[in-house]
Image (cartoon, helix red, strand yellow):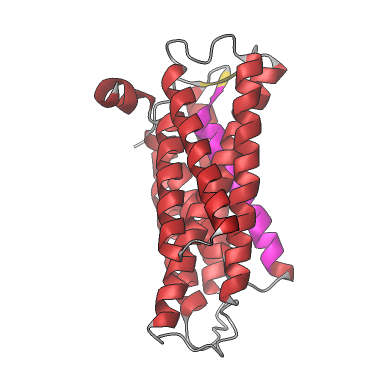
């Protein structure tokens, strides 16, 4: 067993345990005072950073794979939310970033590492890759947030959550934050696509075609969802569906090259 895998197992378990515990605290009918889930998330973030370092030492190459960069972005998001939670006591995002980081360290361990950022790449191409990953991170959080919104909506309709629960934010506030996340993520995705057409000679060449088609399709999905949400309003279940389709398309575009080439194309 190599060092990376030895770090991956406990880190994944810590993230999943923290995510489940924080979700239970978020949906509890009474305010929870235990800080152990937060401490568990802090420990997971430490393991996450050690996993990134160990992975770079194991590879010993002159490039950072896309999954390594994505794992680093996930770690930065987790640390940011932990610091934010110290000043804004709101458990909304902590379960989200727990599962979000668990997903990305898993991708780092098992997704192909053939595509990445080389030290000799142009600044424009590196910017395109980073923007694409940043957009994916934002829209992944949007999807997990949509799941939370749908669950809150379901519980409220079935009167399983008390409206007086202090740990539960207003439903309209949650919808507003979700819309902002989707809009910001879509804008970043649009800029990433535009930068690709500017800095990559042929976005439809072999090796790029499936990424361009899938990510462009996801961009259209999010545009349609935001437009319908703005003019007509969408039910929580419909928002989850749009976010799910968008995230799946982006996942296949960025990390599913082998799957797309062998089973789709």
User: Residue placed farthest to the right in the image?
Assistant: 87
Q: Position of residue 182 (x, y in %)?
A: 58, 50
Depicted 180 relative to depicted 17: above or below = above
Q: Is residue 98 magenta?
A: no
Q: Quadrant of the C terminus?
A: top left
**Nearer to me, 68 or 170:** 170
Q: Is residue 83 magenta?
A: yes
Q: What secondary structure predominates along the stretch shown in magenta? A: helix
Residue 48 makes an appearance in the image: no
Q: Quadrant of the N terminus?
A: top left
Q: Position of residue 254 (x, y in %)?
A: 46, 30
User: Residue placed farthest to the left in the image?
Assistant: 263
**Nearer to me, 219 or 74:** 219
Tell me the residue at 27%/21% (across/down). 262
Depicted 193 relative to depicted 222: above or below = above
Tell me the residue at 45%/74% (across/down). 153
Residues drawn in magenta: 64-85
Residue 196 in which image quadrant: top right
Q: Position of residue 120 (x, y in %)?
A: 65, 11
Tell me the residue at 49%/31% (across/down). 215
Residue 9 makes an appearance in the image: yes
Q: Position of residue 187 (x, y in %)?
A: 65, 40
Q: How many marks?
A: 0
Depicted 62 relative to depicted 259: above or below = above
């Amino acid at each position: 067993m190599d060092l990376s895998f030895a770090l991956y197992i406990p880190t994944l378990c810590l993230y999943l345990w923290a995510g489940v515990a924080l979700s239970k605290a978020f949906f509890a009918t009474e305010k929870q005072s235990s800080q152990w889930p937060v401490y568990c998330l802090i420990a997971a973030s430490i393991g996450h950073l050690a996993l990134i370092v160990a992975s770079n030492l194991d590879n010993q190459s002159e490039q950072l794979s896309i999954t390594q960069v994505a794992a680093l972005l996930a770690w930065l998001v987790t640390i940011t939310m932990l610091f934010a939670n110290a000043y804004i006591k709101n458990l909304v995002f902590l379960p989200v970033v727990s599962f979000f980081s668990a997903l990305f360290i898993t991708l780092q361990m098992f997704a192909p590492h053939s595509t990445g950022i080389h030290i000799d790449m142009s600044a424009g191409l590196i910017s395109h890759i980073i923007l694409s990953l940043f957009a994916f991170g934002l829209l992944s959080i949007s999807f997990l947030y949509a799941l939370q919104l749908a669950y809150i909506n379901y519980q409220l309709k079935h009167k399983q959550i008390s409206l007086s629960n202090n740990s539960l934010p207003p439903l309209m506030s949650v919808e507003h934050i979700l819309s902002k996340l989707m809009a910001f993520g879509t804008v970043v995705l649009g800029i990433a696509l535009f930068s690709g057409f500017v800095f990559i000679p042929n976005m439809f060449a072999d090796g790029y075609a499936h990424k361009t088609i899938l990510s462009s399709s996801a961009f259209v999905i999010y545009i349609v969802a935001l437009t319908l949400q703005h003019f007509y309003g969408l039910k929580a279940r419909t928002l989850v569906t749009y976010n799910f389709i968008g995230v799946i398309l982006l996942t296949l575009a960025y990390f599913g090259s082998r799957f797309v080439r062998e089973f789709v194309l």
